[in-house]
Structures are given as structure tokens and as C-alpha cells.
Image (cartoon, rainbow, N blue to C red):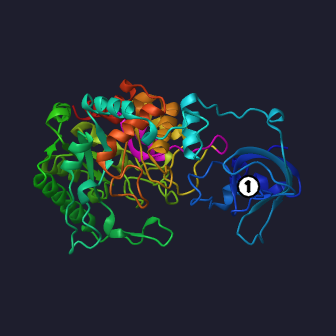
Amino acid sequence: MHITWSDLVSGAADALDGVRVEVTGWMVPVDDREEHGCFLLAPEPPCCAACPPTDPLTTIAVFASHPIGHPGAELRVAGQWRRVTDDAAGWLFQLRDAVPIPAEAAPPTAFAFTRRGMLAAGAAIGLSAFGSGRAYGAAGEDSRSAARRILADTLTVDLHSHAGRVLPGRDASRPRPFEALAEPMRDGGLSVACLAIVADSPTTEITPERRIRAVRQPEPGELHAWGRAALDRLHRLIAEQRLAVVTDAATLRAARTAGPAVVVAAEGADFLEGVADRLDEAHAGYRLRHLQLTHYRVNELGDIQTETPVHGGLTAFGAEVVRRCNRLGIVVDVAHGTTDLVKRAAAVTTKPLVLSHTSLAVTSLSGRPPRRSRRITADHARIVAGTGGVVGVWPPTSEFPDLTAYAGGVARMADAVGVDHVGIGSDMMGLLSPSALPSYRRLPHLAASLLEVGFRPDEIGRILGGNYARVFAASVG
């Protein structure tokens, strides 16, 4: 019988111990040996060799009597299913005496790649057979010149950034010095950065597993005071580097020629501390125009992707904040929120939503990203697109090792939701891993890579800023 990855998560596969089953997945080697009679099977390809699967609920240890397939390949195998509790590596599921099922004997999967999606999948696992096989550096001067022309005619926007070292660090008594922001934006052709403070920093830490988690509850008034200090610092950076501040659609449009400019943003509404009137203060006093509801703390507004849900999605207070953002003219950003939060926000809002920085889970099988992942499913992304909104794709090298792969990830998102609903959210200076887009000076290289994976110049213009400009105008006016 055939089992799916959801059977593992739901527990249905536990009852099949000893039964001969078939399963389809992506092959991940367990070491550097040439033989592949022992390997892991995962619901999606790893982004790189340094990032093997880690979730026992979505990983199968496969044991075969002879080599099967090759690393990075999608394959269908049959064997004896075992649910185990004593695996030395901690895996819960094994497939023993496994044999491959020929492609002609396997039914087609439900997920069909478009040409652009095939290019993206190839980029994600380091294959060139899906496309031209050329990285940007070998693309030639024509692509570079075309990219520069596209940028010259485009209002370009980064949907999510901490560039310029706007974040003060976790020790407020020893703030870090600013770094150049205006100059790299000019050099690379970026018109506008949605520059975000982080509202929950005093309560979070980076764990040894390289996760950000809340480790304590804030004191009353603590996050409100932190948010005000962080916004003060953001405005000092703006003044020091002589950046324009975008407050409405007219100043956003002007930024193409008068920039570089900044949209004042907050990553997490924790500074409100459950008091909606503080949003009015931030709007008037700090020119806040872009608000992400949640971050790495389950706050008063709702649940987050990286922790166990508490509220069942968006809270009543969260819905009140969405409505007030609509009324004041503030873009609502649902990044980090659970699917249930996004569904509720979409039902409440009268304006388009933004999900500023994420990536699409590379899977045709499980239909879900790993637990505690910041990746999203296509259905999750389509909720945002259904409001007329935009999903920003981010560039951590743990997912996209270079700009070619990153452009492929953008292409996958465009296939899922349509090119009018995709943007770029760099999370500049906010990633825990290196970035495939480490500087705005690399923006022309990204534009060239987008050309290489098959986007037209007008589509690139929408991805690099036009789509966000549409949402901003609808939200802010």
C-alpha cells in the first residue's frame, strides 16, 4: 500500500508496522560513501549538504540491499515498514529491504512543476539540467546591462530589512554603531527599504540550536519602552544618513528618483502591550507605516510558526489592531504568524496583506514545511495573495546557497501565487545564517539571475517593488 508523509505526522503509519508499503520522497545520503543502500528519505530536498533533515516525524531511514538512485533525487521505493523506538540516530521510521519502483510504474504526483518551478527545483538542489546551466557570473555582459536598465526604470522595494545596523543589540547600554545604508542602496539601485525595529528583543535569546525563542515574560511597560527607544534609534539612522521617509503613496513613488528612502516598520507589535492606542502614537509620532503582528514571542495578537499555538490563530486584540491599521493607513504584515492567524487576518482586513519574508516549502509530497519552520505552504501563501497582497521571499544561504538558487525560490513562489503577488524581503542584517543577498550592491546581480530563470523585465519590475507599491498605495493612500 502507498503511504503519504501526512500519515507519519498523523500517526496513521504507526499501525502499519511490518506491512509492505510504498513511499515517495527525496534521497539524502547519510555519509560520503559512493554506495546508497542506506540513506534518509525526506518529503523535500535539503537546501544544501550542510542541512540534512532533522525532524523524526518527517524522515525515514531506508535500508536496501543494493544502491538506489543518487543524492538529491526524488524516488519511489517499496519495502517493509517499521515503527521503531531504538534507532541509534533517533529516527522513528524505517523502510527495510527497500527496492526502487521504476518511474513508469509509479503514478504521477499531484504537484505539477511549471517550467519556472522546474528551474527553481534544480537551483534548490544544485542541478543545472532544468535550465540553461549558467550561473550569473557566466551570463555575460548583456544580462548585466539589461538588469541595470530594469533597475533604472523600477521603483525597487525591500519588504523587510534591518540594514544599516538599525537594531541596537541585546544590551541596550552598549548600542552598536550604525553602518552604511544610503550608499549601498544608491550603488545597487534600491529605492526603498522597509526598515524594521524588533519589538520583542528583551525577552528572546538565540539557543544553541540556532533558534530564536522567548525565554521569559516581559515586565509591565518594558516592551513599550523598548519599542520607543528602538524607533528613536531608527530615526537617528534616517537623519544621520539623510534618508527620506515614506509616509504615503506619493512619497513612495517619488523615492524612485528622490531616494533612497525608508518605510518605518516594526517586526512584532509587542510594544503595544495590548493597548491599541499606542498604535496611533507610533503612526503619528514615529511615522510607522508597516506593522508585522508577531515575531518570536507568542504575544497578545496571536500565534507564531515557531512555537506551539496558544490562541488558535489571531486573537480578538489582533483583529482590533488589523482594523486599526486599515483605518490609520498602516500595511499589515503577517510574517511569522501561523496559517490560522493568516486566515483570520485575511477575513478581518479590508486592505491587502503582506507576508514580508519567508520561502515556499519545497515539497510535492507532505504539503507542509517542517515543524517550527519559517517556510510556508503554497496554500498559506495563497491566503495572502487572495487579499491582493504580496509574499516576500528571503535569501538565507541555508535555503538558497547563491543568487541563482534564490531566483529559483522566487520563481517557485511566482508559480504558486502568481507574479503579481511576489516580492523580495531580504531580512538584511537579521538572518541567523549568511545571506545570498548580503548587500544592496548585489541587487543588479539578483535582477540578472531573475532574467536567467525566465522572468520578463516587466515581471522583474513588479517583483522588485511594483507589487509592494500597489499594496502600500491601497493600504496607506
Residue 61 sits in which quadrant? bottom right
Q: Is residue 10 above or below residue 108?
A: below
* Horizontal relation, residue 476 to residue 284: left or right: right
Q: What residue is drawn where x is 71% and y is 70%? A: 89
Q: Nearer the viewer, residue 406 or 304?
A: 406
Q: Nearer the viewer, residue 52 or 273?
A: 52
The answer to whether any part of residue 279 appears in the image is yes
The answer to whether any part of residue 166 appears in the image is no
Decide whether residue 454 is among the magenta residues.
no
* Horizontal relation, residue 350 to residue 401: left or right: left
Task: Check disc 1 and give the amino acid type.
Answer: Gly
Residue 108 sits in which quadrant? top right
Q: Nearer the viewer, residue 37 or 266?
A: 37
Q: Nearer the viewer, residue 33 or 175?
A: 33
Quarter holding the N terminus is top right
Q: Is residue 108 above or below residue 82?
A: above
Q: What residue is drawn where x is 49% and y is 37%? A: 413
* Stretch of the chain drawn in magenta: 340-366
Q: Mark 1, residues whose alpha carbon is within 10 Å: few (<14), some, or many (≥20)?
A: few
How many marks do you count on the picture? 1
Q: Is label 1 in a helix, a strand or a loop?
A: loop
Q: Point out residue 446 in the picture as x, y percentages from the top left corner.
A: 38, 40
Residue 133 sits in which quadrant? top right
Q: Point out residue 122 in the picture as x, y percentages from the top left corner.
A: 58, 40
Q: Point out residue 379 in the picture as x, y percentages from the top left corner.
A: 54, 37
* Horizontal relation, residue 265 to residue 63: left or right: left
Decide whether residue 347 is among the magenta residues.
yes
Q: Point out residue 432 in the picture as x, y percentages from the top left corner.
A: 42, 61
Quarter holding the C terminus is top left
The residue under label 1 is 11
